[in-house]
Amino acid sequence: MPEQADIGDLRIAVLGTGANGAGIGADLADAGLDVTFIDQWPDNVAAIREHGVRVEIAGAVRTVRVPVLHLCEVATLVEPFDVVLVLVKAYDTRWACELIKPHVASTGVVVGVQNGMTGEAIVEVMGEERALAAVIEITAALYQPGFVERHSGYDRSWFAVGAPDPAARHHVGPVAQILRKAGFVEEVDDIRSPKWMKLVLNAGELAPSAVLDESITDCARIPGMREVMIDAGNEAIELAGLDGIAVRPIFGMEGDRASDPDTFMQTILDELVENYVLAHSRSTILQDWIKGRHAEVEDINGLVVSGLARHGRTAPVNQTMVEFARMIESGAIARGRHNLEPMLARIDELRRARP
């Protein structure tokens, strides 16, 4: 895809049309771009076909008609896509890229618009010249098929786009133009850094609030939990330092506190709660558990645990989140406030066991 491509001429697929995928895709279609949805939830596909994708924001609902395919229909595609935005869960990235690879133009690109560090997996499947990674901060929910609750206004919807390998940098400009139809976009040279900074935040906000079955803001107000959330993020910051990942502001933040390893997590958590989520906004992990789905805890908190283990260090808070997530997903315990004291006790136990 040429660096100065006219995005109006590009065929775009959104692979994974949950809350963010469907919401972003609706923005692109509203802007007149050629967009096709591809999703794995049959009821979601059926609802979008019948009613269009409905997006509620600030109390107003708009309906956008978008062509939509189920995964099983991908094999019927004839004309290739120029840009594929991948918004499946992090653990589904590799097979999703393998699925869509035969249907991406030779000059096209696949973009991971996801949580987690999925850029390398996309490169491995698509090759260095056809893979981009993006950071996304949009708060949304999808509890009913085809109906997106968007909690972030367009002035609080943020992306960073970059190439994991320099061979794909010519794709960054056109993809940034596309995503600007949905929010503010920052083009970056080192995508690994902002991707990890978002993981830092995710480690602290997503699983802790989900284990307690609370909104992100309510969780942060529970005595002792703001400290737990910050500590989970700080363990990810510790790993960043060991792996040579630069701490840098994201979400358009400025100032020394937003780039200082000692204050980054508390600064970004406060920014998130004050400006990017609503009082009732639930984390993506909690939304998955409400739907009975496997969540991305292993790809976020688990990545911190395994990463610090490589350096001979432990991550008590993130390990606790992984342990509780596994118990919840296996049915051994239920999510809820009753997990608070056992969670805090397990963190303390793991901290005392540190060598």
Image: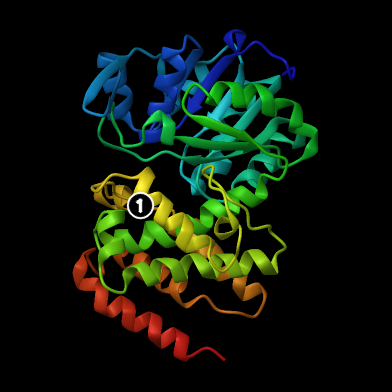
Q: Is residue 149 left or right of residue 194?
A: left
Task: Identify the residue at horizontal 26%, vertical 14% (top origin).
Answer: 50
The answer to whether residue 45 is above or below residue 80 is below
The answer to whether residue 347 is above or below residue 234 is below
Of residues 344 and 53, which is closer to you in this image? 344
| Residue 328 visible from this viewpoint | yes
Of residues 72 and 152, which is closer to you in this image? 152
Quadrant in the rendering for residue 18: top left
Task: Identify the residue at horizontal 69%, vertical 13% (top origin).
Answer: 5
Residue 234: image location, x then y, percent: 52, 68
| Residue 329 visible from this viewpoint | no
Residue 290: image location, x then y, percent: 25, 50
Which quarter of the figure is the C terminus placed in? bottom right
Circle count = 1
Task: Identify the residue at horizontal 19%, vertical 72% (top origin).
Answer: 338
The scheme the figure's colours follow is rainbow
Which quarter of the figure is the N terminus placed in? top right
Determine the secondary structure under disc 1.
helix
Label 1 Cα crowd, 10 Å radius (few <14 / some 14-19 / many 20+): some
The answer to whether residue 235 is above or below residue 186 is below
The kind of residue on which mark 1 rests is Val
Residue 43: image location, x then y, percent: 27, 28
Residue 145: image location, x then y, percent: 26, 30
Residue lying furthest right in this view? Answer: 167
Residue lying furthest front in this view? Answer: 255
Q: Which residue is mark 1?
A: 273
Q: Is residue 322 left or right of residue 336?
A: right
Task: Identify the residue at horizontal 56%, vertical 21% (top origin).
Answer: 178
Q: Is residue 252 left or right of residue 63?
A: right
